[in-house]
Image (cartoon, rainbow, N blue to C red):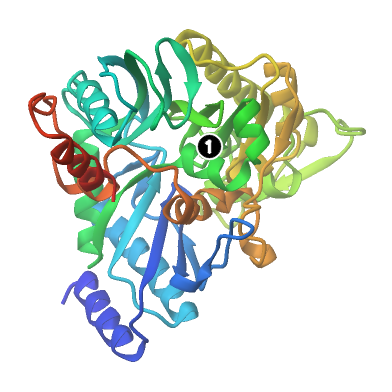
Amino acid sequence: MSRLEDRRQARDGLKATLVRQPAVAAVDLGASKVTCFIMKADGVHRDNRTLTTAGVGYVQSRGVRGGAIVNLDEAAQAIAQAVERAETVAGVSVQGVSVCTAGGQLASHRVQTQVSLGARPIADGDLSRAISSALAQVRLPGRKPVHLLPIAWSVDGQKGIRDPRAMFGRSLGLELLVVSVNENIFHTLAHCVERAHLSFEGIVAAPFASALAALEEDEMDLGAVCIDMGGGSTSVAVFNNGALCHVDSLAVGGGHVTQDIARGLQTSVAGAERIKTLHGSAIASANEDREMIEAPPRGDDPGAGPVIAPRSLLKGIIQPRVEETLELLRERLKASGAPVEPGAGIVLTGGASQLAGVREVAVRVFDRPVRLGRPRRVPHLADAASGPAFCAAAGVLHRTAFGPREVVSPKTLSGGQVRKRPMDPNASPVAKAAAWLRDNL
C-alpha cells in the first residue's frame, strides 16, 4: 500500500474523531516549509478586523524546489501532514484548502475599460457591464487568472473612486488587475492538493496574502511595497490608494543563499543552512576577520575535519546574493511601470527576510524606509508561528474574512471559466445585477 493511501486512511480515521463544523484552511506551500492555518467561523472579529486561528501546523517542505513542484507525491504528503497537524490542534476537520504560493511564474497586468451611462444613478448592472468589458480584454494564452481585482473606478474621468454606485455621469471607467500563473503549474498544484485528499479551492499569490497580514491600512492607502522573501522565490506586491496594483516574482530566494554557502565553504546543504542561521549576515560586523566559524565537511569521510573559515568569508558570500536579488526586483519594478509612490515604504516578509542585515541592504538598494513585517492581524499567535515566515498563511485567512472582494469569485477561478464576452447590452438591469451578484457572492 502506498504512503498516500496510508495517509488517506489516517486522515479518514482522524476526521471520524473530530468535530465537523465550518472551518477555513489556508496552506502556504513553500520551498522550505509547508504551513496550514485553520480558522473557525467564530474566529473573525469584525470590530477590530483581527482573526483567531483554531489550529496551526507546519512541516519541512518536500517535493518543492524554486517555487515549483518537482515531486508530486512528496509535496502531497507534506500538505497532508501539515493539514493533519493543524486539524488535530483545532479539533475540526477541513475538506478543502486555499493554497498560497509565489511559484507558477506569478505575474500581473492591468486592463482598462470604459462604458457609457444613462441619465440615472450608477447601479450594479453598470458595474457588471464594465467588468464584463474588462474581462473581454483578458487574453492569457497558457496562463490561468488567480486574482481579478479592481484597482480603481472613475466617473467622467474623475479617478480614485472606490464605489461609484448611486453617482451620476456619462461614462464609467474601470482599471482591473489580473494576476495569473502558468496554466500547467496551476493544474499540477490542483492535482497535488487532490492527491492529499483535499478539495482545491484556488491559489492566492503569496506577496498579496503577506501584504494583507502585515500592512497597516494607512500603508495601503499611502502606498507600500511588500516583498515576500521565501526559500525558493522572492515576490512583490505593490499597493496604492488602498488597492493592489502590481504583483511580480523572481525564482531566487533564501535557498539560493544556502546553496551559495554550501559551494563556497565546501560543506553540506544542511550544514550551510545551520551556519547561515547562526552566523549569517548580509552586512559587515566588528571583528569578523578574526572570528572563525566551523562547518561540517561534505561527504561521509570519517577522517575529514571540519571546514574552518573566517566569518568575513560568509558575509562575502551572502551579501552579493541578497543585493543581486533586491536589485533585480527594483529594476523589474521600474520596468513594469507600477505606480510606486515616492513616499512608499518597503515591508519585508517571508523566512529569508529574517537573515541579519537584509533590512539594511534593502534600505541601501531601494533608498526607502524598510521595516520587517509580521502577521499583525492575528495577535494571539504563539511566538513560533508569529514571525515574518507566517504572514502568507495568515493573509489567506484575512482575505477570506475581510476581502478585498474580487470581481470573479475564487471558486469560479479555480474551477470555472472567466466570462470572455461582455454581457448582452440588451439584458435587463435585473439580469445584469444578478450576474454581478453571481460572480461575487
Image position of 263 (left or right of 191): right
Neighbours of disc 1 within 10 Å: few (<14), some (14-19), many (20+): some
At 24% from the left edge and 50% from the top edge, which residue is drawn? 411
Quick one: which residue is furthest to the front in this view?
A: 119
Where is 8 relative to 67, above or below? Answer: below
The residue lying toward the viewer, choosing from 47 and 354, is 47
Q: Amino acid under label 1? A: Gln
Image coords of residue 47 (percent x, y)? 61, 60
Which SS class for mark 1? helix
Where is 256 relative to 112, above or below? Answer: below
Image position of 23 (left or right of 372): left
Position of the N terminus, as image quadrant, is bottom left
Give the quadrant of residue 241: top right
Residue wearing tag 1: 259
Image coords of residue 277 (percent x, y)? 68, 48
At 30% from the left edge and 24% from the top edge, which residue is drawn? 120
Q: Is residue 9 visible?
A: yes
Image position of 419 (left or right of 154): left
